[in-house]
Every structure is written in structure tokens, then in C-alpha cells.
Amino acid sequence: MKDLVQRFRTRIELRQIGARQEARIVKGLGICGREVCCATLLQSLDRVSVKMAKEQNMSLNPEKISGLCGRLMCCLGYEYDGYAAMKKDMPKCGKMVQTPEGRGKVIRQSALQGEVGRRPGKRKRGDIQNEGHPANTGRSICGSKR
């Protein structure tokens, strides 16, 4: 330290940074092929939880939901509000719904496609498209295909 101060003739401070801040500074490419969200899209590094990954129907495999820093990917937090808004108008899993083909039980939700999967009384499966849903693009909010 003293050698650096003498050489540069200025005050030098050392600060400890976390794994997310390090990844933000170093940058790099995420699993989606784009530059990591913490370095480009996000102004502040908010908390990210496993609940956010579950809400987005992500695999809970740590290798798939971990970023370059080894913690949960920042884009999970960035996209969470969008997914929650998309799913707000969709029927929940396990709920009975009425369709033109008859009553059925919702067995899955696909927020990005604006569809829910249902199981009618005859045990066949079918999809219900939510026509007025804004999320029929098949892309996540940050632009990566899911």
C-alpha cells in the first residue's frame, strides 16, 4: 500500500465488494448469450429469491439459475414484476375453468405464451389461449428466449 501511495502520490483506499458487484464490474455473458443484466440493465442490485425462479417456472437446478457470480441470476429479479403481472389475469393451477370444449382443471400456466394447460373431464389435455394477453411474444422481458 505504502509503495502505491508513494508512486502515485495520492490517497488509495481498499474496499471490499461482494460477488455481484465483482461480476458487475468484470462483466461477461450470461446463459442467454447477452451481457449480464447486473452490468447493463440494473441500476441497483436488489435481492433475488428462489420464489422468483418458481414464479417464472424456471428449473430449480442451481446451474441453470445461477449467474456468473455464483448467486441467483439478477434477471430473475428484473423480470419478476413482469411475470407476476402476466400471471395475474390467468387462472391458477388446480382451478376449474369453463371453455368452449367444456369444464376443465388448469394443470399448467405459460405466462409468456399467454396460455394455460387444462385437463377436461375426459382426461385429455388441451391448451387455452388467452387472446387479450400482451405476452404472446414467446420472449422474456430482457429479450432472451425462454
Image (cartoon, rainbow, N blue to C red):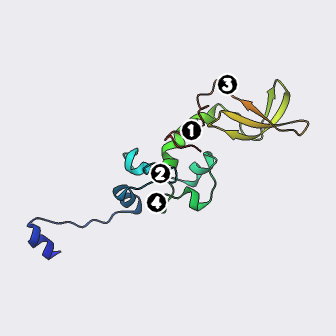
Report the quarter where the C terminus lies: top right
Farthest front residue in view: 33
Q: Position of residue 41 (x, y in %)?
A: 40, 44
Left or right of residue 107: residue 132: left
Q: Which residue is mark 2?
A: 74
Calculate the distance from the C-alpha at mark 4 to the C-alpha at mark 3.
Answer: 37 Å
Query: Distance from label 3 to label 1 (Cα)?
Result: 17 Å
Residue at the spot 86% in from the left edge and 27% down from the top edge: 102
Where residue 17 sits: x, y (%)?
Answer: 34, 63
Mark 4 vs mark 2: give the one in front. 4
Contact flag, marks 1 and 4 (Cβ < 8 Å): no
Q: Amino acid at mark 3?
A: Glu
Look at the numbered discs 2 and 3 and tell me whether their residues touch, using CB distance below 8 Å.
Answer: no
The residue pinned by badge 4 equals 68
Query: Which residue lies under the disc numbered 3?
Result: 131
Helix, strand or loop at mark 2 = helix
Q: Distance from label 1 to label 2 (Cα)?
A: 17 Å
Label 4 vs 3, first from the N-terminus? 4
The mark that comes first in sequence, 2 or 3, is: 2
Instruction: Identify residue type, mark 2.
Output: Cys
Specify few, some or many for label 4: CA neighbours under 10 Å numbering under 14, 14-19, or 20 or more: many
Q: Check if mark 4's residue and mark 2's residue have beta carbons within 8 Å.
A: no
